[in-house]
Image: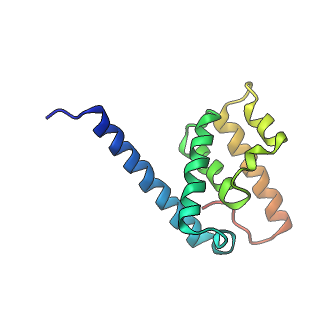
Amino acid sequence: MLIRSDQVDDMAASQLSAYHRKLARQFRANHREATARYTNDEMLTIIASAHDRATGYGIRREEGVRKFITMAVLIHPNFDDEPTVKSYLKQPDLDPDFKIIRLADRVGKNIREQQPGWRPDA
């Protein structure tokens, strides 16, 4: 049996879509108030766009990608357009996954200090 490259691409796209739907369900279950403003289609679009942008910054590991998506869903879909954030994420001197994990952890800490009981991880 020979598997064509377009079939491999279709399988990869299907797996990625399933991953995005799983994240959307987790966000809905764990962050009802924060995600109530999005329809299911909007949420999936935000997740897919954030995933693409994360990889564009060189973020590759699952934890880094998940943190980037979490910030896009819970803070703002284009949080990385803020000039300071964009400049930080484009710095060449640090590992991209390290940068987003550190940024997400710092933002989560600041939010927890301001809003006790808030959980940033989906």
Which quadrant: the C terminus?
bottom right
Give the residue drawn at x 61%, y 44%. Answer: 64
To which quarter of the image does residue 93 belong?
top right
Residue 1 lies, in percent from the top left, at: 13, 35
Give the residue drawn at x 64%, y 38%. Answer: 97
Q: Is residue 12 left or right of residue 49?
A: left
**28 above or below 74?**
below
Report the number of discs: 0
Residue 4 lies, in percent from the top left, at: 25, 33
Q: How is the image coloured?
A: rainbow
Q: Residue furthest top?
A: 93
Give the residue drawn at x 71%, y 50%. Answer: 78
Q: Is residue 88 left or right of residue 13?
A: right
Residue 43 lies, in percent from the top left, at: 58, 62
Give the residue drawn at x 74%, y 36%. Answer: 89
Q: Nearer the viewer, residue 112 or 35?
A: 35
To which quarter of the image does residue 65 belong?
top right
Residue 109 lies, in percent from the top left, at: 79, 57
Q: Nearer the viewer, residue 17 or 27?
A: 17
